[in-house]
Image: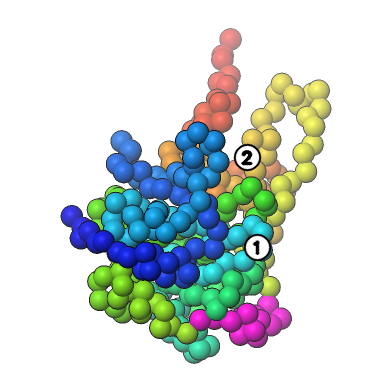
Amino acid sequence: MYTTFCVSRETADRFIKLFVNRRAYGMQAAHPLPNGSVPYYLARNWQTKKPKPLDADVVRMHLNGDITINLYAINPETQRSKWVAIDADFDGAVEALFQLQWELKQDGVEAALEQSRRGGHLWIFADAPLLASECRIYIYNLALRLGVPVKGGGLKDGIEVFPRQDQIEDGEYGNAIRAPLGVHRKTNQRYWFYEAALTPEAQLDYLDSLKKLTEAELRTFIQGMTLPEAYRPVVAPPYIPPSASTLCTEFRILDYVRATRKDSRNWWAQCPSCAQAGHDRTGDNLAIQIRNPRLYKCWAGCTKEEIRAALGQPIRRKVAV
Ligand SMILES: [Zn+2]
C-alpha cells in the first residue's frame, strides 16, 4: 500500500502553478476493469455533464492519495502547454530517458525524471506556456538525432511526447498523462521523481528549483526545423462516394477508420480490433497502403477477420454451390 498525506492548500497551489494549464481533467477509476486496466474518465459534473474544473481541493485529494487524476497538456484557447512530458515504457526506456535528459542538459534545459509503472516520464517545465507545436518539433528532432525511438511513424515501441497534438479544436482535450506525485490505482503505488525526498513538499521544492525553459530559448533550438514527416498529422483522405457497382460488393477500410497520419507509403489509423480490446491508444497500429487501400495490416497482429468483425462488417465466406 501507499503512504497517505495531508497536504496544505499552499502545496496544492504550488502543484497547480507547475502542472495545471487547463481546468478539465480526468479521474482514474478506483478499481481495475476485468481486463486489469484502470481507465481514466473525464471528470464531469453529474448533473450538467459539463467538465468539472480542476481546483485546489481536487489537487489536495490527488496528492493525499484519495483520488488519482490526469492532466491535459494543451489549453485550446492558446494551443500552449506549461510542460513537456516524455513517456517511455519499452525495453531500455529508462536508459533512453537518461540519454534525452543528458542531451537536454547540453542545451541548458533541466529535465526531471519521474518513475512510472514500466519505465519513466521525463518532464520539462516552461517559464511561461509554450506553443505545443514548437515543443514537439524540439523533442522529436532531439530524439531522432539521438536514435531514441519515437512511437508512431511505423514504430510500435518508442517514446511518446506530450503534448501529443500540435493543436486542438475548441471542445477537444487531446491526450492526458497521469498527474505526478499521486497514487497509480493499478499498482497502488506512488511513483516519485528520482532527485528528491519522498514527500509532495520535497518533490515540489525540487521541481521549483529547476531552470524553466523560455520561448526564446526554445525558438533558438528549433530554428530551421520542422516536425519529421513521418510524424506529421494528416487530414483524413477525401471521401469518395461509393459507386453503385461497388456499393454492395466492395469493403473499403477507409470508409470506417480515420487516418491519424500518413507517410510516403501508408495511412496510419487506430486498429478497430485493437481498440475494441482497449489497445492502440496511440491510434496507429493499422497501416493502409496508399497506392492500394484495399491492403491493410495491423502491426499488433490482428487478423483481417478480427478487424472486419470489430467493424461489424464480418468477411462473408463464399459458399460453395
Ligand atoms: Zn489490431
Quarter of the image where one finds residue 115: bottom left
Image mark for residue 47:
none
Indicate the amino acid at tag 2.
Val
Question: Mark 1 near mark 2, Cβ–Cβ under 8 Å?
Answer: no
x 49%, y 75%: residue: 125
**Considering the image in quadrants, where does the C terminus appear?**
top right
Q: Magenta part of the protein: which range? A: 212-225
x 64%, y 69%: residue: 131
Residue 22 placement (x, y as % from top left): 55, 58
Q: Is residue 168 visible?
A: yes
Q: In this orientation, which residue lies closer to the viewer: 163 or 13?
A: 13
For the rendered model, the colour scheme is rainbow
Residue 309 placement (x, y as % from top left): 52, 28
The local crowd at label 1, few if under 14, some if 14 to 19, many if 20 or more residues have their Cα within 10 Å, is: many
Image mark for residue 79:
1
Indicate the amino acid at tag 1.
Gln
The local crowd at label 2, few if under 14, some if 14 to 19, many if 20 or more residues have their Cα within 10 Å, is: some
x 29%, y 58%: residue: 64
Q: Earlier in the sequence, mark 1 or mark 2?
A: 1
